[in-house]
Image: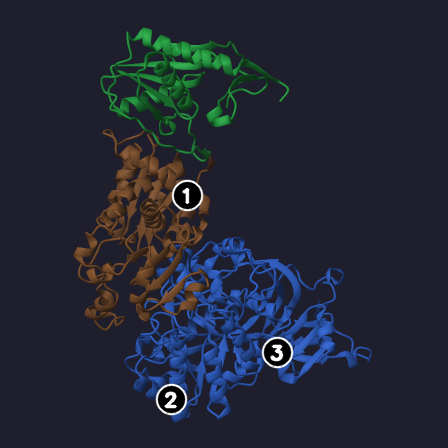
Chain colours: A green, B blue, C brown
């Protein structure tokens, strides 16, 4: 695709995640009650990498979970294609914990809203924080990220694509012109 | 008023006539028949009172007789009346209807028959003959007053669609009818074997989970009634034969001289139980990759069961639509003369009674207006010649009723049908003149349509000003080719 | 992602891929049912009407729990005490429910094919919860789910279905599902409760029909016993229940002759001591309680596919 521009390389992604790992540690004064929860699908490998980065510098193994928010979305239509429902899997009870939600791109905020609803049904955490690799703006809900890999000002007609080894075979973030996200 | 029906293909099976020619009708009778030999001879000049009906390309035949009509009046006028039934008969080319004793009150006594006769004379626009009930209330428990019924003008006895389960009672009924010289018309279905059934027992009933009616339910009673007819000397007429086994039993009985006649309906000759599947049928074909539509059923391409939804209540008939083996045996029986007549079993129902679950739908098809076109599918696919088909609608029924057949000989009553065997049309039940719109054929394209019907010299139906303009004449029919090979 | 489904009347129009997708979704739904708050908001604001013309407490409750777990408003319509007893037709009833705003109708009816009639008069979605002898697609889906979760996959499984095959809607829907997913199915029972084999193989050409159960046991991966209605004996289809039990009943002796991994299923409700014995129904090969539990998850998955 010729109208694609890379905005993060593999190395830049790695460094952004390591930085986020440190910020989580600093913000919470330690990692004792932290649970990292990736939002399906690309939030899951990102959550695992952040947890691995934490293990690297701290030796702590923070619990990592995965959250499927399909059943909580507010943009499902009658008689459209049905999004595939996948499993939600949290390794421990999140009540009283600090849950760090992880997603690839923060855009309208609707995915995060759905994730917050899902988390609320799964337990009562002490606090919920949000980590994203890219914040591209255009929020439709009063939601902001606590940890951001890179802020990327975009227009609505552009599309931000996060590609990861685990899902796409390659690590990079690109921006495409003339095609908005969904 | 006199009519000259010109240039039609005249087919009169009773007189072994099949020719292109003209027919002059006067005073309710056929006055003269001009065949090819007369075409160039001198004719006396026609008077100004003669209306010329141009029938070029159409078949001109004696009016049809239906042995099996349910009038519904009196008793169920929301389904049909004598007026609407006879109007539907005219549209279908029928000039005589034999009314089954299924009206209410049951015509099981002379007074009821006389009341029915009066209604039929007042409202009927075609000839209506009455069949008396065989048992009181058609209940199969006690014989009706058969002698009085005969004296009141009944032409036969029947219990409608019901089988008399009690063989001893059936024997008595036949003995009585034999003495009166009238046929006993039976519908054969063993009530125990058929209990709860709504579909032919076979692959389709299993697939759809519908309680089945085995072919043996019919054949067991056909065999019983043939034995009783043989013992009593009665004239047994088997209504709406539907299985291969029944055809074989009747063939054997006739061969040893038993007085048994039989009729078959147009739908049992042409439709199978796969029509119950409706569009499920198509789905199966896509799945299994079987080529073409209905390889097991040599339906003409314009008949398509997939136009119906599955379990459409219009496919519920008694006896049930059978499978292709039975359909082929029925056609064979028709061809070789074992089956005398095609009878419509015209059974109109109101929509409100039909828009319901399959198992509780009342059985029957409103068939007078589609009977000819449906039966003609056999001619179009080369399974029956047209002369034989017309015989099964004219001469055959007359033989069942022991009367001289409707015919086109000079002096005969002018009961005449003119139909275009090639005219293609789509069945639109909203256009039915019958009050019964219940037919699985709705939306189907059929070939062959009645253009004009004359009952006793009176035009009782005429389609679109038929025959008035010479230039509007239909294309020459390929029947001329068929006739040459006769 | 795949197209949403409008109606679920039988499994005959479900592809293998769609069945697999529903079974996978059901896996996720089981996780939801394991939570403390057993509810997700997918069907919030939607109205599901359970229209049962034939009593079936188990199926009705299973659908009710499934719809509630997806946050739908659930209304029960039972024929008893309703306008149906006053002679209202099925079509009128459906039109009324439509006018009242039903989005999804779940229906149970004693007449085969009745759901096709309802579907013609209803603009929403329809799920068949059993019609006459014709179909019971959600039962078949939960059976498939149970087999898959116990035995790993459906392909090449030897499935023996024993009992009153002729009158069973469960059998017909299972035949579509099992044959489409590649199982080898044998129907077993007395001839009066099956009918001629050719009637079955015309539609499902790969299945086998036999009248002896015992020779099948050593090779079976799944044995599914069907409920035997006691009326069958009165209508002359069976000489005696005792004889039926002796030849076709799932006894402890027969259980012992199954391979170790084999499972025993029953769509319920069971006639214990007739087609299945209590010690068999509670033994470890029996998956009967699991079938019931899985039923809710599978029905959630189907509801999601139709309205999600």
- What residue do we see at 40% from left, 44% from top? C122
Can you tell which quarter of the image residue A28 is in? top left
Viewer-side residue, B84 vs C251: C251
Q: Is residue A34 visible?
A: yes
- What residue do we see at 27% from left, 70% from top? C237
* Image location (x, y in percent) of residue B195: 32, 70
Secondary structure under tag 3 reads helix
Between the residue at mark 1 and the residue at mark 3, the CA separation in whole angstroms equals: 57 Å
Between the residue at mark 1 and the residue at mark 2, the CA separation in whole angstroms equals: 61 Å
* Image location (x, y in percent) of residue B172: 33, 88
Dividing the image into 4 quarters, which one contains the C terminus of chain B? bottom right
Q: Are marks 1 and 3 on the same chain?
A: no
Residue of label 3? B388
Secondary structure under tag 1 reads helix
Residue of label 2? B228
Q: Chain of mark 2?
A: B
Which comes sooner in the sequence, label 2 or label 3?
2
Q: Report the disc number at residue B290.
A: none
Nearer to us: label 1 or label 2: 1
Q: Are marks 1 and 2 on the same chain?
A: no
Q: Are marks 2 and 3 on the same chain?
A: yes
Between the residue at mark 2 and the residue at mark 3, the CA separation in whole angstroms equals: 30 Å
Q: Is residue A140 visible?
A: no
Q: Chain of mark 1?
A: C
Q: Report the disc number at residue C20.
A: 1
Secondary structure under tag 2 reads helix
* Image location (x, y in percent) of residue B2: 67, 73
Determine contact: label 1, label 2, CB under 8 Å.
no
Viewer-side residue, B189 vs B13: B189
């Amino acid at each position: 695709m010729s109208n694609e521009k890379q905005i993060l390389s593999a190395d830049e992604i790695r460094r952004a995640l390591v930085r986020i790992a440190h910020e989580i540690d600093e913000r919470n004064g330690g990692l004792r009650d932290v649970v990292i929860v990736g939002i399906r699908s690309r939030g899951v490998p990102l959550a695992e990498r952040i947890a691995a980065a934490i293990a690297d510098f701290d030796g702590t193994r923070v619990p990592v979970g995965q959250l499927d928010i399909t059943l909580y979305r507010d943009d499902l239509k009658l008689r459209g294609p049905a999004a595939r429902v996948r499993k939600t899997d949290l390794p421990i009870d999140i009540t009283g914990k600090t849950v760090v939600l992880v997603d690839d791109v923060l855009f309208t905020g609707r995915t995060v809203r759905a994730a917050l609803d899902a988390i609320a049904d799964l337990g009562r955490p002490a606090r919920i924080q949000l980590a994203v690799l890219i914040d591209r703006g255009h929020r439709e809900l009063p939601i902001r990220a606590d940890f951001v890999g890179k802020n990327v000002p975009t227009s609505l007609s552009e599309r931000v694509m996060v590609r990861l080894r685990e899902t796409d075979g390659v690590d990079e973030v690109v921006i495409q012109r003339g095609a908005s996200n969904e | 008023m006199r009519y000259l029906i010109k240039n039609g293909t005249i087919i009169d099976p009773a007189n072994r006539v099949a020719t292109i020619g003209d027919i002059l009708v006067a005073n309710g009778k056929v006055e003269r028949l001009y065949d090819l030999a007369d075409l160039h001879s001198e004719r006396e000049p026609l008077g100004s009172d003669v209306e010329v009906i141009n029938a070029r390309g159409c078949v001109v035949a004696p009016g049809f007789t239906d042995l099996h009509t349910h009038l519904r009046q009196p008793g169920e006028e929301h389904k049909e009346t004598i007026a609407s039934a006879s109007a539907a008969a005219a549209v279908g080319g029928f000039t005589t209807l034999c009314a089954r004793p299924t009206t209410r009150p049951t015509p099981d006594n002379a007074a009821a028959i006389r009341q029915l006769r009066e209604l039929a004379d007042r409202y009927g626009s075609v000839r209506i003959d009455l069949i008396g009930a065989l048992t009181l209330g058609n209940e199969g428990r006690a014989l009706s007053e058969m002698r009085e019924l005969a004296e009141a003008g009944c032409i036969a006895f029947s219990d409608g669609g019901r089988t008399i389960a009690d063989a001893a009672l059936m024997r008595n009924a036949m003995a009585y009818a034999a003495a009166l010289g009238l046929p006993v018309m039976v519908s054969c279905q063993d009530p125990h074997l058929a209990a709860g059934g709504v579909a032919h027992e076979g692959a389709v009933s299993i697939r759809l989970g519908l309680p089945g009616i085995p072919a043996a339910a019919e054949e067991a009673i056909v065999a019983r009634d043939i034995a009783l007819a043989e013992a009593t000397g009665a004239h047994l007429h088997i209504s709406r034969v539907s299985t291969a086994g029944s055809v074989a039993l009747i063939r054997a009985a006739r061969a040893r001289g038993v007085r048994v006649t039989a009729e078959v309906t147009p739908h049992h000759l042409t439709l199978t139980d796969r029509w119950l599947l409706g569009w499920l049928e198509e789905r199966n074909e896509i799945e299994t990759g079987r080529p073409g539509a209905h390889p097991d059923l040599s339906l003409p391409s314009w008949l398509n069961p997939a136009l119906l939804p599955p379990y459409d209540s219009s496919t519920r008939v008694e006896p049930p639509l059978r499978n292709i083996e039975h359909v082929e045996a029925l056609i064979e029986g028709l061809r070789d003369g074992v089956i005398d007549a095609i009878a419509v079993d015209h059974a109109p129902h109101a929509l409100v009674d039909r828009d319901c679950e399959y198992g509780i739908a009342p059985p029957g098809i409103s068939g007078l207006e589609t009977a000819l076109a449906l039966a003609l599918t056999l001619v179009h696919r080369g399974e029956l010649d047209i002369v034989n088909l017309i015989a099964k609608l004219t001469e055959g029924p007359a033989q069942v009723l022991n009367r001289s057949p409707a015919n086109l000989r000079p002096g005969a009553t002018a009961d005449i049908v003119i139909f275009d065997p090639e005219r293609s049309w789509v069945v639109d039940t909203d256009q039915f003149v019958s009050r019964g719109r219940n037919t699985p054929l709705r939306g189907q394209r059929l070939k062959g349509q009645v253009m004009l019907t004359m009952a006793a010299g009176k035009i009782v139906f005429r389609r679109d000003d038929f025959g008035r303009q010479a230039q509007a004449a239909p294309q020459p029919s390929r029947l001329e080719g068929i006739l040459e090979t006769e | 992602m795949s197209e949403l489904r409008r109606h679920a009347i039988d499994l005959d129009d479900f592809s293998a891929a769609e069945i697999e997708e529903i079974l996978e979704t059901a896996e996720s739904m089981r996780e939801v049912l394991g939570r403390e708050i057993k509810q997700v908001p997918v069907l919030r604001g939607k109205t599901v009407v359970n229209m049962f013309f034939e009593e079936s407490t188990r199926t009705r409750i299973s659908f009710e729990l499934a719809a509630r777990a997806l946050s739908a408003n659930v209304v029960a319509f039972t024929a008893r005490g309703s306008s149906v007893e006053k002679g209202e037709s099925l079509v009128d009833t459906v039109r009324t429910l439509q006018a009242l705003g039903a989005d999804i109708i779940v229906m149970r009816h004693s007449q085969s094919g009745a759901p096709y009639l309802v579907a013609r008069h209803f603009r929403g979605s329809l799920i068949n919860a059993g019609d006459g002898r014709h179909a019971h697609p959600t039962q078949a889906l939960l059976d498939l789910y149970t087999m898959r979760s116990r035995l790993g996959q459906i392909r090449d499984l030897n499935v023996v279905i024993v009992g009153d095959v002729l009158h069973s809607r469960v059998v017909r829907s299972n035949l579509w599902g099992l044959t489409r997913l590649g199982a080898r199915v044998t129907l077993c029972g007395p001839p009066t409760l099956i009918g001629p084999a050719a009637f079955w193989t015309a539609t499902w050409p790969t299945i086998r029909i036999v009248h002896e159960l015992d020779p099948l046991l050593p090779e079976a991966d799944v044995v599914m016993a069907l409920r035997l209605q006691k009326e069958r004996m009165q209508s002359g289809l069976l000489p005696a229940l005792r004889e039926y039990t002796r030849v076709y009943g799932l006894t402890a002796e027969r259980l012992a002759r199954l391979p170790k991994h084999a499972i025993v299923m029953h769509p319920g409700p069971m006639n214990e001591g007739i087609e299945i014995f209590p010690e068999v129904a509670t033994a470890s090969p029996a998956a009967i309680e699991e079938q019931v539990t899985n039923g809710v998850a599978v029905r959630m998955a189907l509801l999601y596919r139709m309205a999600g």
